Image (tube, rainbow, N blue to C red):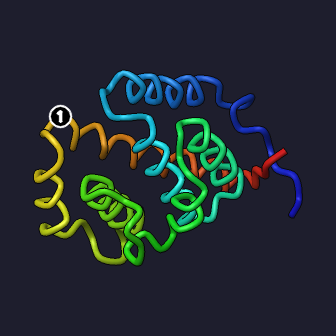
Amino acid sequence: MQARIEWAKHAPQAYKAMVGLEQALANSGLENSLLELVRLRASQINGCAYCVNMHANDARMAGETEARLQTLSVWRETRYFTPRERAALAWVESLTRLAEHGAPQAEYDALFEHFEAEEVANLTLAIATINAWNRFGVGFAMVPA
């Protein structure tokens, strides 16, 4: 693949805004390990090599096990993930594949068995944010160093 522009250099205000979203998420009260699972799963779906690499490493640093990381793409087929994580992962997949089947009411309702309303809002922000990062990563052909 041909090299593309370094987008953050050409749109520093956009980059700053994206970093601001990440700062809001860091202060959201959602556990870091959950945020990294969300980021990694969306990045897998979107095919963002840069983000998959980064968030797999960040998840390890947050205490994730190799078994969970290796099976994240097939999380429904394992027993490694808690009901709270499963609800979040289902929401990640729906919002990341929004054009395919929307945001099903059942998946939305399931969130409230494990999350408070503020957490649902912040989880949705996390999903929206990583999907935006993925568009920069894939669009500008970013690859792991």
Identify the residue at horizontal 51%, vertical 59% (top origin).
Answer: 68
Q: Amino acid at mark 1?
A: Glu
Residue 34: image quadrant is top left
Quadrant that contains the C terminus? top right
Observer-nearest of 95 and 57: 57
Residue in view at x 80 percent, y 43 percent: 5
- Please tell me whether residue 115 is drawn above or below residue 31 in the rendered image: below
Determine the residue positioned at 17% across, 44% down.
115
Exactly how many numbered labels are in the figure? 1
Query: Left or right: 105 with respect to 31?
Result: left
Q: What residue do we see at 29% from left, 76% from top?
A: 101
Question: In front: 43, or 11?
Answer: 43
Q: Is residue 72 above or below residue 130?
A: below
> Where's residue 78, x and y in %?
41, 72
Q: Position of residue 71 (x, y in %)?
A: 53, 68
User: Where in the figure is residue 124, as x and y percent of width and height?
Assistant: 30, 46
Q: Position of residue 9 (x, y in %)?
A: 74, 28
Task: Check disc 1: other Cα within 10 Å, few if <14, some if 14-19, many if 20+.
Answer: few
Between residues 91 and 34, which one lies in front from this camera angle? 34
> Which residue, as the protein is rendered here, is positioned at the far right?
2
Q: Is residue 50 left or right of residue 4?
A: left
* Numbered disc 1: secondary structure: helix
Where's the N terminus, which quadrant?
bottom right
Left/right placement of residue 20 relative to residue 10 reads left
Pick the residue in front: 96 or 34.
34
Residue 44, compared with residue 17, is above or below; it is below
Position of residue 114 relative to residue 19, above or below, is below
**Disc 1 marks which residue?**
118
